[in-house]
Amino acid sequence: MTTDERGHQPVKAALHAPERPGDQPRNRSERPRGLARRRDLIAAAAGVALVTAAVLVGRAIQHADGSLQVNWPPLLGTWDPRVGPGTPAALAVAVLIVAYGPGLAARLPWRALLFTTWAAALAWTFSLALVDGWHWGVARRLTTKNEYLTVIDRFADIGTTLRGFTEHIVIGPPGNWPAHVAGHPPGATLSFVWLDRIGLGGGSWAGAWCVVVGGSAVAAVLVTVRALTDEHTARRAAPFLALAPAAVWMGTSADGYFAGVTAWSLALLALAATRTIRFPVTAALGAGLLYGFTCYLSYGLTLMALPGLGVLLVARTARPLPAVLAGALVVPVAFTLAGFNWWEGYEELVVRYYQGAGGVRPYAYWIWGNLAATTLAVGLATVAGLGRVLALAPRAVRDRTSPTARQGLAVLVLAALLAILVADLSGMSKAETERIWLPFMLWLLPATALLPGRRRGWLTGQAVVALLINHLVFTGW
């Protein structure tokens, strides 16, 4: 048996090759395959049951006392059936990806696949956003009262603003920041300030920036999966990354932009760890630099260290760590010298969080309601893939010396799932997780590579979930 240049099993056989000498090849018996597919359907049915329970219980609680602080639990949004300019395009993109996505993913040259998947994700995201037209679907999203663009003028002197940033987080003192500005380190708002400074000011440019950078995350995930497992595995995940229901919230949400930054941090780490790039030390420095910046985009994204650890576990090396840590110090040192204290900001945020909806929303509902929202964002195909990941987990954890492609993928997905669970248990993510957890959820989507066959039925299901949510619920953030 030959191996590729990274020492993996041949890409055509990696996902389906027997993992132990005693395993029976697939064509010897249909029973194992049929049992696995039934388990996929059971996992998907469990996802449906979770969402149904979250809707019914959530509506009852919200009707009784309004404590959930959302109009359409478990999602933040309002019931608003509609069609719009983006509807024909969204339908066309969905049909094209379902019909041709798996075939193109298998045949296109690798670099062409990366750009094609990115382009398809952009088309899908933009078309869903344009269901509400350019103004309401793109340009206005980041200009509402809680958003970043409302405070651009207050950053005329960036140094002075950074030194006094934490003084305006808690509600009470004059001039407290809007919810999203207060809820994030200043790196998030500064991103839009810098766009404004180079002449790309306003909601249209900010929205387009978030979609384009966020859309690039699918290419970063493919690069990571290929480096850690094999090309065949990455190709099988590509159509599901392009057609993810999460695109409903990737569209012009700043969290989509955050997802793009974090995804490229992990991609560079994977390339450095597997040494599948000419300058691995430079890649490791870049990974650390982006991770450090990530921590100043959102406090909760420090948890991306867990998927990063998963990358190193799959690659079975800690070699990149010194360069990663060196790169990761750059942004924190710069912000600290500029006068912003990250820990002080986080402590003030906790106070602000419980001053608002966070202090009202019941933990007992959102601890599992958040997972229902995540299910809607990643789709039932991903839930079925997660069932296969959990089945692989015991062997993937034990067999750390020479994991197969499937086991490596399982470890990567499990690391992202662990980050979600930690965020969930923290109590600092009650509701709106369909948007807030986008940087974590992207790393659950590759689990779809484990689903058998051409999987057009699963792809269709993903598209239907996104189209229904986008046309029936006006999502907010």
Image: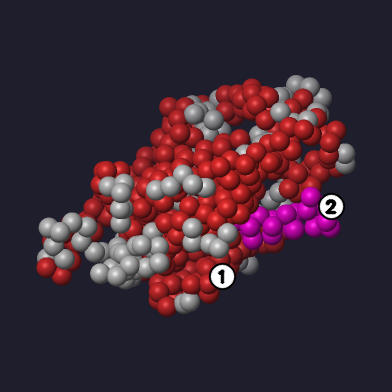
Q: Position of residue 210 (x, y in %)?
A: 66, 55
Q: Which span of residues is magenta-colored?
A: 194-214
Indicate the secondary structure of the residue bearing disc 2: helix
**Is 426 inside the magenta-drawn segment?**
no
Q: Specify the quadrant that holds the N terminus.
A: bottom left
Q: Position of residue 325 (x, y in %)?
A: 58, 40
Q: Position of residue 247 (x, y in %)?
A: 54, 57
Along the viewing direction, whichever of 323 and 358 lies nearer the viewer:
323
Give the residue at mark 1.
115
> Residue at the spot x=83%, y=39% of the render?
158
Left or right position of 118 against 160: left
Tag 2: residue type? Arg
Which residue is situated farthest in the right direction here? 156
Q: Position of residue 477 (x, y in %)?
A: 62, 43
Tag 1: residue type? Phe
Picture quarter containing residue 368?
Answer: top left
State which tag comes first along the sequence, 2 or 1. Answer: 1
Relative to 64, residue 334 above or below: below
Give neighbour class at mark 1: few <14, some 14-19, many 20+ (Cα, 10 Å). Answer: some
Q: How is the image coloured?
A: secondary structure
- CA–CA distance between discs 2 and 1? 29 Å
- Tag shown at residue 197: 2
Indicate the secondary structure of the residue bearing disc 1: helix
> Residue at the spot x=27%, y=55% of the render?
41
Q: Is residue 344 visible?
A: yes
Along the viewing direction, whichever of 206 and 186 lies nearer the viewer:
186
- Tag shown at residue 476: none
